[in-house]
Image (cartoon, rainbow, N blue to C red):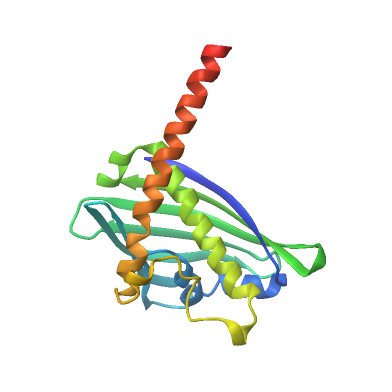
Amino acid sequence: MPFKIEEEFEVQAPVQRVWEYLITPAKVVMCIPGAELLESQDERSFIGAVKVKVGPVTMSYKGLVKFTEIDEQAHQVHLIGEGRETGGAGSAKVTMLNKVTPLEGGRALVVVNAEVDLVGKIVQFGRGMIEEVSRQLFRQFSTCVKHHLETPVESQTTGPPQLESQTDEKAPATEREALRAAPLVLHAMWTVVVRFFLRLFGKQVG
């Protein structure tokens, strides 16, 4: 199931600071729900894992992410990633371009364009839901990045703003992050249903 991701967000921070953050995997992975950096093969190649739990279905992927081009002057980076589902036959491939451009007032604009191809049990949720979940996850990612870059260093915590309930505080970090996918999927289901009926009624009225 191939699909595209085209997203952008503004950060109240200088371009160079945002750029340096986004090309540092150890920092970026902190803002990706369920993700973990396992090993650095070299300066541009990294092995990581990501876990998503949707109701009774848990999907875990492990794979390689590689920066194929880093343009310091243009503040843009190309990367490719490929992972295999742990204990399953699924896989995920991604080709991504991230670019940071300056805005007025010392702000920066982050633009992300990616092509993703998914294989395996995750596709049972359908394209509409997967795309909606990806948008929700991107919002979590951008909120976390902004938290780290817009908050004074002395005021920052070691992670993104806490969204889970107090009862989850003692759960392992990876599990807490994975569990966040469940409400995201419920929200995505509702969004997809609403869009379907809006299109249906729109056609009937026309």
For residue 179, which quarter of the picture?
bottom left
188 relative position to 152: left or right: left
> Relative to 2, is 200 above or below?
above
> Relative to 92, is 146 above or below?
below
Residue located at (50% from left, 56% from top): 138
Give the residue furthest to the front. Answer: 166
Residue located at (37% from left, 71% from top): 166
For residue 12, which quarter of the picture?
bottom right
Give the residue furthest to the bottom. Answer: 154
Q: Quadrant of the N terminus?
A: top left
Q: As rendered, which of 59 and 85 lies closer to the eye?
A: 59
Q: As rendered, which of 156 and 103 lies closer to the eye?
A: 156
At which x and y percent is residue 159?
Answer: 47, 76
Give the total of numbered labels.
Answer: 0
For residue 82, which quarter of the picture?
bottom left
Q: Quadrant of the C terminus?
A: top right
Residue located at (49% from left, 31% from top): 195
190 relative position to 24: left or right: left
Q: Is residue 120 visible?
A: no
Q: Is residue 141 visible?
A: yes
At which x and y percent is residue 54?
Answer: 29, 52
Residue located at (58% from left, 74% from top): 148
At which x and y percent is residue 34?
Answer: 36, 65
Give the residue furthest to the left. Answer: 87
> Relative to 138, is 105 above or below?
below
